[in-house]
Amino acid sequence: MQIISIINQKGGVGKTTTVINLAAGLSQLKKKVLVIDLDPQGNATTGLGLFNMDNSDDTIYAVLNGTKEISDAIKKTNLENLDIITSNVDLSGLEVETADDGNRAFILKSKLAAYLNNSRASYDYVLIDCPPSLSLLTVMALVCSNSLLVPLQTEFFALEGLTQLMKTIERIKVSLNPDLKIRGILLTMYDKRNKLSSQVEQEARDYFREQVYSTVIPRNVRLSEAPSHGVPVLIYDKSCPGSKSYFSFTDEFLNQETTMGTAA
């Protein structure tokens, strides 16, 4: 089983879209997937057809503050093989509430390990949708993950932000999770009509080489529409360019399993 954080400290780069559609693609290939929505905005929750109501008491926030067990917080989605632990705005208060806890970076890791070790759950993948910041929640996710995946918007300043993110990842590896690997960088919001997209792609491939996935996710209206209907684009319109790209990415992601050792 792999625990993978999908992370970028910049918002609006296709992070949650990637979580939702990778999870859907894997589940359609008979892989059992658990999505953990660790973003207080709760977009992965609504994007998979569930509610991120403020008064819900069975969210990831309740797990992290100790009032619920993971087994009580897991919900079924409308897709076979795909479960989720939902999130809402309550989660944004966790950093202040745990300020006196010296081990707070390890809370999610210990909760998840206890559940996976003691239950009959047999997930192939746990995908964590991180918030768009380098906050405590992101650190918690990276501490408990085997690897991470970075969606990178093919626009100006994207590589600059990625450099900052890589420094944070290195600090996490040194102090909290030495086994953390970079699974790959996924180029998103690609516009073939825009020369800048091609330039950013070339720079990313020149610098990060084989860590950049071959698949590129295009800008696509249907990709933007799908979340408002509470379904992945793979279900909403399986023949649109966005769906075709995420199907291709899912295949590339799975084919990586044999070469994971090189992507550190």
Image (spheres, grey):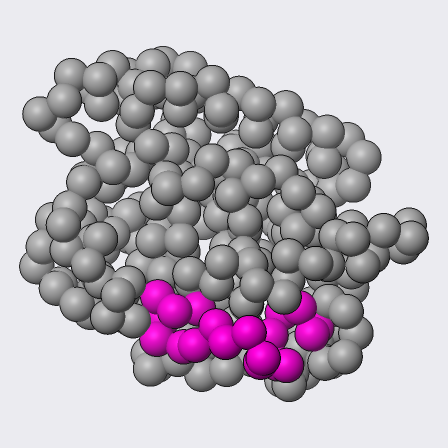
**Which residue is located at x 57 percent, y 45 percent?**
147
Q: In this view, does 200 lie above or below 25?
A: above
**Which residue is located at x 63 percent, y 24 percent?**
167
Q: Quadrant of residue 218?
A: top left
- Left or right: residue 200 versus residue 157 is left
Q: In this view, does 48 lie above or below 145?
A: below
- Left or right: residue 156 versus residue 174 is left
**Which residue is located at x 45 percent, y 49 percent?**
257
Most foreground residue, 205 or 138: 138
Q: Does the stretch in magenta take in 58?
A: yes
Tell me the quarter of the image containing the N terminus: bottom right
Residue 206 image offset from top left, x and y in percent = 36, 14
Q: Does the stretch in magenta take in 14?
A: no
Specify start and end residues of the magenta stretch as a single range: 45-63
Residue 112 image offset from top left, x and y in percent = 69, 67
Residue, far front: 54
Residue 55 image offset from top left, x and y in percent = 58, 79
Residue 84 visible at all: no
Tell me the quarter of the image containing the C terminus: top right
Q: In which quarter of the image is residue 215?
A: top left
Majority SS type along the magenta span: loop
